[in-house]
Amino acid sequence: MGTINHTNLTTYNVPALAEFFCSVFGFHPLDQRGDKLAVLKNPDGFLLTLMFDKNMTSERGYPGLFHIGFLQATPKDVDTIHQALSTRSYEAPQPDILARGGPHTYGFYCNAPGGVLVEVSTMNLVNTI
């Protein structure tokens, strides 16, 4: 058994993706090697490694619905992150009820720089529906 405590994402724009995760989601850099590698850590100790992939482009990225998610405690937390994205000029649709076949959530998906799809949502729908 164990806890997932790190992941590696490939991207065609390491610096922009690192800035996105640091400015919006509270990661901070542990190591950076030019524009080819960044190792980030969040306040919970989760490590996120970003690596340049010469085969990845804005037209050719991750397959299908691959994404990473930031599950939030409340709808207000989702709205706060959405506001943080907007303040930093990142484009994200307004949060809404997401019905995708499983339990409904409140949140949104956005395209982070460098070709990574990010979900921000909460399963706590009290006073949302």
Image (tube, rainbow, N blue to C red):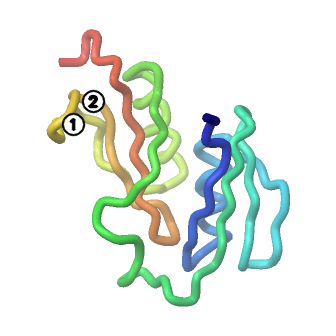
- Residue to which mark 2 is pinned: 105
Give the crowd class for mark 2: few <14, some 14-19, many >=20 residues within 10 Å.
many
Q: Is residue 13 above or below residue 40?
A: below
Would residue 46 be found to the left or right of residue 113 on screen? right
Occupied quadrant, residue 74: top left
For label 1, the SS is: strand
Q: Is residue 16 above or below residue 94?
A: below
Judging depth in this view, the residue of 9 and 1 nearest the camera is 1
- Figure quadrant of the N terminus: top right
Would residue 1 be found to the left or right of residue 61 on screen? right
What is the x, y in percent for residue 82? 43, 39
Q: How many marks?
A: 2
Q: Is residue 108 above or below residue 121?
A: below
- Figure quadrant of the C terminus: top left
Asked whether the beta carbons under mark 1 and mark 2 sit within 8 Å of each other, the answer is yes
Occupied quadrant, residue 103: top left
Judging depth in this view, the residue of 83 and 27 nearest the camera is 27
Question: Residue at horizontal 21%, vertical 28%?
Answer: 104
Would residue 34 be found to the left or right of residue 54 on screen? right
Q: Earlier in the sequence, mark 1 or mark 2?
A: 1
What is the x, y in percent for residue 60? 38, 83
- Give amino acid for label 2: Thr
What is the x, y in percent for residue 27? 70, 46
Give the crowd class for mark 1: few <14, some 14-19, many >=20 residues within 10 Å.
some
Question: What is the distance, in whole Å, between disc 1 and disc 2 at their CAs?
Answer: 5 Å
For label 2, the SS is: strand
- Give amino acid for label 1: Leu
Question: Residue at horizontal 63%, vertical 78%?
Answer: 52
Tell me, for residue 98, which label it has, or none. 1
Judging depth in this view, the residue of 20 and 3 nearest the camera is 3
Judging depth in this view, the residue of 49 and 19 nearest the camera is 49
